[in-house]
Amino acid sequence: MYGRYTQDLGTFAKDEAARLRLQEGDTPRPRRPSELLEYTQGRCAPCRVCALQCQRFLISKVGEDWVFLILLGLVMALVSWAMDFAIATCLQAQKWMYGGLDTNVLLQYMAWVTYPTVLITFSAGFTQILAPQAVGSGIPEMKTILRGVVLKEYLTLKTFVAKVIGLTCALGSGMPLGKEGPFVHIASMCAALLSRFLSLFGGFYENEARNIEMLAAACAVGVGCCFAAPIGGVLFSIEVTSTFFAVRNYWRGFFAATFSAFIFRVLAVWNKDEETITALFKTRFRLDFPFDLQELPAFAVIGIASGFGGALFVYLNRKIVQFMRRQKTINRFLMKKRLLFPALVTLIISTLTFPPGFGQFMAGQLTQKDTLVTLFDNQTWAKQGISNEFEYLGILEAWHHPRSNVFITLVVFILMKFWMSALATTIPVPCGAFMPVFVIGAAFGRLVGESMAAWFPDGIHTDSNIYRIVPGGYAVVGAAALSGAVTHTVSTAVIVFELTGQISHILPVMIAVILANAVAQSLQPSLYDSIIRIKKLPYLPELGWGHHEKYNVRVEDIMVRDIRYVTLNCKYRDLQQVLHSTKMKNLPLVESAESMILLGSIERTQVGALLSNQLSPQRRLLTLRQKVLSEDGHRLSDSSIRFQISTETSSGTPARPALRKPLKPALKRVPSSPADSPPAGSTDHTGIALKSLFCANAATEPTEAQGTAYHKAKRVRISIVEEMILGDKMTPAEILEWEEQQLDQLVDFSSAKIDPAPFQLVEHTSLHKTHTIFSLLGLDHAFVTSIGRLVGMVSLKELRKAIEGSLTGKGVKVRPPLASFRDSTTSTTEADTTALRQLWNRHQHHHMPREAGPGGDDDDDTPK
Amino acid sequence: MYGRYTQDLGTFAKDEAARLRLQEGDTPRPRRPSELLEYTQGRCAPCRVCALQCQRFLISKVGEDWVFLILLGLVMALVSWAMDFAIATCLQAQKWMYGGLDTNVLLQYMAWVTYPTVLITFSAGFTQILAPQAVGSGIPEMKTILRGVVLKEYLTLKTFVAKVIGLTCALGSGMPLGKEGPFVHIASMCAALLSRFLSLFGGFYENEARNIEMLAAACAVGVGCCFAAPIGGVLFSIEVTSTFFAVRNYWRGFFAATFSAFIFRVLAVWNKDEETITALFKTRFRLDFPFDLQELPAFAVIGIASGFGGALFVYLNRKIVQFMRRQKTINRFLMKKRLLFPALVTLIISTLTFPPGFGQFMAGQLTQKDTLVTLFDNQTWAKQGISNEFEYLGILEAWHHPRSNVFITLVVFILMKFWMSALATTIPVPCGAFMPVFVIGAAFGRLVGESMAAWFPDGIHTDSNIYRIVPGGYAVVGAAALSGAVTHTVSTAVIVFELTGQISHILPVMIAVILANAVAQSLQPSLYDSIIRIKKLPYLPELGWGHHEKYNVRVEDIMVRDIRYVTLNCKYRDLQQVLHSTKMKNLPLVESAESMILLGSIERTQVGALLSNQLSPQRRLLTLRQKVLSEDGHRLSDSSIRFQISTETSSGTPARPALRKPLKPALKRVPSSPADSPPAGSTDHTGIALKSLFCANAATEPTEAQGTAYHKAKRVRISIVEEMILGDKMTPAEILEWEEQQLDQLVDFSSAKIDPAPFQLVEHTSLHKTHTIFSLLGLDHAFVTSIGRLVGMVSLKELRKAIEGSLTGKGVKVRPPLASFRDSTTSTTEADTTALRQLWNRHQHHHMPREAGPGGDDDDDTPK
C-alpha cells in the first residue's frame, strides 16, 4: 500500500493510462481541418477559429501547476473568508442574545449555555453522520497521507462538506477550539477535489507523485489562508507534515499560500473591515527599543515553562482520550449516546465561562479573537505608580475585576483554559488545538510581562532614557513558545510575526521557541504524533535528538531472518504452505532455496490469485472440455470465446478504457494453460507465457487487485456456475484428486505481477540510514540481501520497535537482542561466505568442468 | 565517490572505527579505582574526585549535538563580528585618507584608487598562494558537497584562513562584493574543523551522515550570522544548498543560527554600537497603513522587472567568465599575470566611483552599508510640492546632486553598479554576489517608489486620510525581488524582514519575490547553478517548472544498455579486457554472462588492484621462492615475514590506528595465494580466503584505495626491487609466459571490496522518479535490473542529458532516441523473457531432473 518506490509499476501503469488518455486528447487535432471547413462557411469564421484556438490554449494551460495553485488559493481564501464571516456571525448572535437578556440572569445563563451546546451537538452529529473522517485536526492524517499511505475517504467531497460545516458550527459555539489543523485538511481535500475536477480537461492530474506534491502545497495554503501567514504557513506545514521535503516543491507552497493570504486579506479590505492589507492581530510595539538585553532571561523562562506546559498539554490530551477509551462503562455509555459527550463537555465549559458567574475571573465573555487582541495590547495593565493610572477601556475591561487584580485573572484564565482546551479538543467535532494553545501561551506571556512591568516600573535600562517594559511583547513570545512546544515546530515564530505584523521581538521569540521545543521534545511527542499513536496510523516515528546510538545499531540486528519466500521453481503446494505460514503482504521471490538469490517481490494477494486460479472450477472445466475436445473437435472455437469472457471478468477493470493490455496475456495463455506439464510443452509456448508475465507487469495496476483477488475468483466461480451445471461431471472425490494433482504442478508465474526491483538493504546498513531511506522513499518493507542473496527482511514494524526501544533507554545504548552476538561471533560472515562459496562452486562446477575439485560438491547441504 | 547509499560499507567501516575508538575511550573507566586510590591519599580528595567526574561529564557532553551547535554559533558570531570590525576599519581608513587629502584632487584620486587595488591584489594573491579553493562564493561547492560529493581541500584550515583573510581584504576595498556566500563556506569549514577538533574528545564526530547534517546546519549559521537573520538564514541555506531537506535537521539550523545571530548582535551592544538588539538595517515605516491596495501593481512591476534583471545579471556574469576563458590571448595573458586582472578591474571600478569624478552621479562615496541605509530611508527624496521641501542631511547628501535630480542619480547608480557587480564577482577573490545585487535591487525599488511618490504626491487613497507613498518600502521590495531572482530563492523575503526589522510589507514583498522568481527561473539558471555549470561540478540539474513530460520518459529510454560487467567466474584476462574497454568507475558483478543476475558492484580501482596484484613481481617472486622452498625447506619463516611487511606497504594506511583489520586478510591469504590453482586447494582454504573478503569489506575505507591503487602497486614494486635483485632469476620471456599463465587463472574476488547491494531501478521507472531517487540518495549511478537480471545502467550523465534534452524542447515532448521504439517493438520484453526462461530452465534442469524436457537445453546460446 505505502511503498511508493515499490509501486513503480503502479505509477507506470497510471502514467501509461495518462499518456494514452493524452493521446486520445490529442486525436481531435487531426479532425481540425474538417472543423475549420465547417466554420469557414460562416461569416465570422476567423473569429471563431481564433476563439477555438484560444479555448484550446486555455484548456492546455489548465494543466499547468500555477493555474491549479491559483485556483486552489482562490477557493481556499473564499472558504476561509466565508467561514470566518459565518463564525463571526454565530459569535455575534450569542453575544446579542446574551446582551438582550440582561434583565434575567437565569435566562441569560440558559442562552449562554444552550447556544454552544446546540451548535456543538449539531456539529458532532452532522460530522458523525456524513463523514466521521472529518473529526479532529486532520494534520496527523495528512502527515500519514503525505508519507504515501492511502487513507480511505479522507479526501472526498463528503468529508469536505462535513468538515467545513462541522468546523463552522464548532468554532461558532465559542468553545476553545482552533481552525488551523482542520484548515490543512480542508485545503488538502480542496486540492484533491480540484485536481479531480481539472482532470476533466487534461490528463496530467492522474499522476501520484504530482498529487503528493500538490497536497504538500495545499497544506501550506491551509495554514497560510487561516492566519494570513504565507511564510509561516509554508514552514509550519512542512514541519508538521513532512519528514523529507523536496525543495523544488517549495515555490508551490509559497505561491499558493501567498495568493491565498492575499485574497483573504483583500476580501477583508473590500468588506470594509480594514483600510488596507495589514496583519490579522496587528501590534504597535515601539520600534526603537523593543526590549532590553537584560530582559532575555525572562524570555528564556517563558520558553522553558512553555516547554513543560506544552508537554503537559499533550500528555493531558492523550490521557483524556485514553481514559475515555479504557473506562469500559464510560466507553459503552458514550458509544451508545454519541452526542452526549460533546454536549456534556460544552455544558461544563460554557457554564464555567458564564460571564456573571465564574467567567468574570477569567475574561469569559471575550471570544478567542478578542482575547488575543487584548493580550497583544500595547499598554501595561498592572499599575505603575500613581501618575500612570491605567484605564481599562473597551474590551480590555473584561480583564479587570473590581475585587481582584489582573494577575489573578490571568492565572485563573491560564489554568482554566488549559484543561478546558485539552478537554475540548477531544470532542468528536472538526477542530484543532493550535489556536487555544496559542491563546493560553499569550496569556502566560502576558502574565510574565505584567510581573516584569510591576517589578521594574521604569524598565531595567540604567541609562538616561527610560524604556518601559512592553508586556504585549511577552505575550507574543509566550504564544509562539507554547504553540511551538505543543506542535514541536519552530515556525510558530514566523507565524506570530506574520500575525502581529511586527518582527522586532525576533530574538526573544526564537530563543523561547527553541527552548520550548528542546524541553517539550525531550518529554513528549508532538500533539500530532500523539494523535497518530492514539489512532494507530501507520507512521514511522522520528529519530530523537541525541541519536548517536542509532549509528551503531545495524539492520542485521533488527531484521527478521526467518522469512517465508517463494522460489521460482516451486509447486502450487508450496505456495499454499507459504500463504498459510505467514501474513507478510509481500513475499520475496528467490531463484532457488539453495542460492536464495533475490529476483523480485510478489504480493500476497497475487500468490493467492495464482493459487485460486490454478484450482478454479473454470480450469477444471477446461480440462474436462479438453478431454471432450479430443473426442469432439468442432467445439474448440466456442470454448476459447467463453474463456475470453471469463478472463475479462476476473481482470476486474472492464470500465477502464485505457487498460487494454492486461487482457492480452490472458488470451495468449489459452494455448499453453491447458497443458498439464508446462515444461514438457514446446519452448515456444513457454516463451509466450513468460512474455505475458511482463506485459501484465507493465500495464496492470497493483492496487486494483489488492485484497479482492479472492473475491474476484469467487465472482468468477459464480459467473460460470451455469457452465458448471452444463459441463461439470466430476464427483467431489474426482475434484479433490484433480486439485491434488494441480497442486503438484510447478507454478507458472506468468500471470502474476512481480516487482522486479524491490528495495534492498545490506546487513551493515545502520539504523539511522535505514530510517532515512524508509522515510525518504516511503517504504513499507525492504529485503536485506548479501551478494544478491536474501538474508532477511525489515518492515516498518521492526524499524518502529527498534527506534522506540532505543528511545526509551535514553542515554544508555540499548542494543537489540541480536546485536550482542555481533562482536563475539562471526556467524553472519560465515553464512555470507557459505553463500558466495556455493555460487562460486556451482559456477565452477557448471562452466569449468576441468577445475571441478573436491570442493565443488553439489550444494544441497545448506539449510536456508 | 558520491553515492552515499552505495558507500554503506564505507560508513559502516567508519562506524566500526568510531565504535572501537569509543570502546577504547571507555576503557579508562576500569582504571578508575586505582586513580581514586591515588587521589584519596591527598587532602582535598573529594574535591578532586568531584572535579574528575565533572570533567568526565563535560567530555561526555561534548559529543552532543547542541554543544557542537553552540560552539559553532559562537565561533561564527565572533568571526563575523571581527570581520565586520576589520572591514569597517578598512573602509574608515580609505575615507580618512580620502578626506585628509582634499586639497589635491590628483592625490585624492591616487589614494582612492590605489587603496582598493592594493587590497584586492593582496587578497587575490594571498588566496591564490594559500588555497585557490577559497576563491568565489562557496555556495555552489557547498551544494555539491551536501549532495555527497567529496571535493578535496574545500573544508580545510588552510582554506579557512585564506577565505577569512581574503574576504576581509576584498570587502575592505569597498568593491561591490558580498560576504554572504563566502560566509556559508566559512561556516561549513568552521563546522568541519570544529568537528575534527571535538573528535579528540569523543568518537561521534566520525560519522559521515552526521557530518552532512552538521554541514547543513553550518550553512544556515553562515547566512544567519552574516545578516543577523536566523530564520531567513535557515531558509536561504536550505533553498540554495539542498534538493531534499530532512525536517529533523531543521532545529539544528535554527538553533545554531539563532545563537549565532544573538551573539553577533550582543557583541554590537557590548561594543556600544547599539543600545539594544535590533535589526541590522532598521527601518521606521509607519505601521497603520504601510501601503495601499492600489500600489500593488507597482510592486508587481518591480517583481517582474527584477526577474528580468536577475536573469540578465546571471547571464552577464557567465558571459564575462566565458569570454575570459575563450579569448585565448586574454586567457594566456591572464594565466601568466594572475594578479593583473583583479587589479585592472578594481582600477576601472574605483576610477568610475571616484566621488569628485563620475562618482558624484552615482553616490560613489557611500559604502555598501551606507547605501542600503539611505535607500531604506523613511523619507521621500523627490520634491513634493513647496511646503514639503526635503533637506538632504548627513549621508543622504550623496544622492543629491545640485545639477541633476535624484532620479538620474538612481538610474546611473543602477546601471553602473549592475555591470560593475557582475564584473567584480568574477575577480578571483573570496566574494559573493548577494549583497551587491541586494543593493541594486533596493536602488531599483527606490527609483520606482520615488516615481510613484512624484506621481501621487498625496497618496492614492481617496478617503479622508492622506497616506503618502513610502519609497523606502519599495526599496525593500526591490531588494528582496532582485536578490531572489538572482539566487532563485523565495527566502530573501524573510531575510529582508529580518534585516529591516519590519514585516509590514509582507504581501508586496512576497508577490514581487514570487513574480521575480517565476520570470528568472524560466529564463536562466540561478547564479549558483550557473557557477556549478561553469565549474563543471558534478551536480544534477533540477527538473524544470512544467515537467509533465518527465513522467512519460522512462529509465529504459535513457539507460546505457551496452555495459561491461565482471562475472563471478571470469579470468584475470577478462578483467584486463573490461578495464581496457570501459571507463566506468563501478563495474557490475554478475553471476554469469548467461544469467546476468546482479550480485553487486565492484569499483574500477578494485579491479585494477586485483589485476596488478595478480601480476605483481612480488607474487612472481613468491612462486619462485616456493619452487626454491620445495628444494630448500628452512627459509619459509623468513619469506613469510617479508611478505607481511610488503603487504603493509601496499595497504597504504600505516598511520591510522583504528584500521588494523585490513592487514589480517592479507596475512591470511599467505597459505592460499601461492597456489597456482585456487580451486584445486582444499575447500577450507577457500573459505578463509572468502571470509577475508568480508573482513576487508568491513574495515577498509573505500576512498583510500581510489585512484592510487596503481601507484601503490608501483610503490610496492620499487620497495621490493632489492629483493628482486636478490631473488628474481626469471628472464623477460619467462616473465611474459608467467604473466600469460596468471591471466588465465580464475579471479579470486576475496580481497576485493564488493558493494553487495548497489542501487537498482526497474526499466519502467519514470525519469521524474529516477531524478527524485538520485537526488534523495545522492546517487552517482544505478543499475537497471529486471527480475534480478542486469539490463542496463543509468549514471548522472545520462540523467543530466535526459533532463536537459527535455528542457530545451519545452512544451514539445522530446522523446529520447530509444523511446520511439517502445510502442512498436517488444525487444526488451523478449530479452527479459529469454533471461527468465533461462533461469527457469536451468533450475528445472538442475533440481528437477525428472522434468528435464527438450526445452531444458543448456543455455550457452545467449549472446549477453
Image: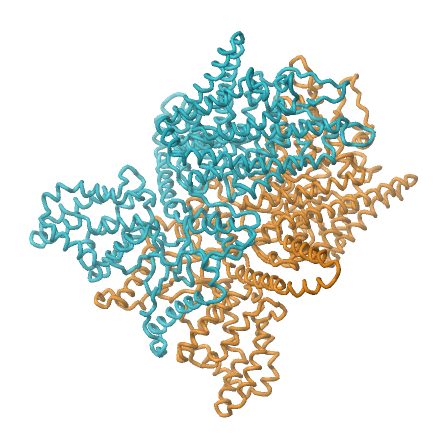
Chain colours: A cyan, B orange
Image quarter of the N terminus of chain A: top left
Left or right: B498 with respect to A861? right
- Residue B229 versus residue A859 in the image, above or below: above
Residue B402 vertical placement versus A91 (above, below): below
Which one is nearer the viewer's eye here, A218 or A107? Answer: A107
Q: Position of residue B658 (x, y in %)?
A: 59, 66
Quadrant where the image shows the C terminus of chain A: bottom left
**Direction right: furthest residue:** B103
In-image side of B843 versus A766 (left or right): left
Question: Residue A279 versus residue A337: which sits nearer the camera?
Answer: A337
In the shown orientation, is residue B23 left or right of residue B794? right
Image quadrant where residue B459 sits:
top right
Query: Please, which residue is most extreme toward the left here?
Result: A631
| Relative image position of residue B646 (x, y in whole percent) | 58, 78
Regarding residue A597, the answer to whether it shows in the image is: yes
User: In the picture provided, is B774 more to the left or to the right than B57?
Assistant: left
Q: In this view, does A28 lie above or below B648?
A: above
The residue at 60%/69% (across/down) is: B653
Number of residue marks: 0
Q: Decide if residue B301 is in sight here.
A: no
Q: In which quarter of the image is residue A537?
A: top left
The image shows residue A367 at horizontal and vertical percentages of 55, 20
Does A476 sit above or below residue B177?
above
Q: Where is residue A505 in the image (x, y as percent from the top left)?
A: 68, 32
In the image, A45 versus B84, the foreground residue is: B84
What is the quadrant of residue B203 in the picture? bottom right
Furthest residue to the top?
A103
